Amino acid sequence: MDGKIITVVQQKGGVGKTMLAAHLSVCAALELGKAVAILDVDPQGSLGEWLEKREALMGEEATGLTFRTSSGWGARREAQSLARDHDVVIIDTPPHAELEAKQTFRSASLALIPVQPSHMDLWATQPILDMASSEDTPSVFVLNRVPARARITQEILDALAKLGGKVAKAQIGNRVAFAESIGQGRTVIETRSSSIAAAEVRSLTKEILRLVSR
């Protein structure tokens, strides 16, 4: 098996990397039938805490996911090892960590860069885009926590286009349902299956998997 490795990366903290990693993983596994592994490279360990809640709720064998942790130096090798037995490996990286980012870029099929509709998030994207380019890793921006009918969203989209990076068509809205589901060890796919939030996750997951399959 030659699995695809997706690294979720952004220099700025608080952009929703862990939330996206969890939701993409569950959607790919439960709804698209993929064998999915998640690799937590962030010392904060939020993805691991989420999975512990999930295991307590469902049982270790019923989470639908393989989970591993790694340090920055070991991330590349661990991701490649997981990719031999899984269709998709999703890596959650820490902010402000150039070493970890470089290691995951070197094994990744795609760098997924979350960006909230704010100028501070925009300013943090150029170093990541440069790093991905230097490692010859394809990248895609994903707009996350998008407020309804906000003018700044289009401003950020226009600015990202000028940076030369690809922007995902699917966007993730600023919805309380995401935080609520993560706190339960689940995702909106499971807690609010018929919601707009769940539809957004499905659209993004399918788009990202199409990108890495090309």
Image (cartoon, rainbow, N blue to C red):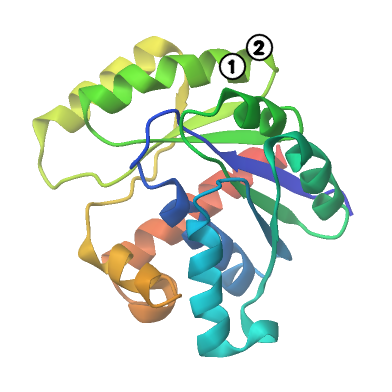
- Answer above or below: position of 141 versus 67: above
Rendered-image quadrant of the N terminus: bottom right
Circle 2 sits on which residue? 134
- Answer above or below: position of 89 versus 6: below
Q: Is residue 32 left or right of residue 107?
A: left
Residue 120 in the image: x percent, y percent? 25, 24
Q: Is residue 4 left or right of residue 113?
A: right
Residue 129 in the image: x percent, y percent? 51, 18
Q: Residue at x 78, y 40 (%)?
A: 74
- Answer above or below: position of 111 versus 189: above
Residue 187 in the image: x percent, y percent? 42, 70
- Answer above or below: position of 182 versus 82: below
Q: Residue at x 60, y 20 (%)?
A: 132
The answer to whether residue 27 is seen in the rendering is: no
Q: Residue at x 29, y 71 (%)?
A: 180
Q: Is residue 12 left or right of residue 3?
A: left
Q: What numbered label is drawn on residue 131?
A: 1
Residue type of the residue flagged with mark 1: Met
**Secondary element at image label 2:** helix
Give neighbour class at mark 1: few <14, some 14-19, many 20+ (Cα, 10 Å): some
Residue type of the residue flagged with mark 2: Ser
Does the residue at mark 1 contact the one at mark 2 (Cβ under 8 Å)?
yes
How far is mark 1 from mark 2, CA to CA?
Answer: 5 Å
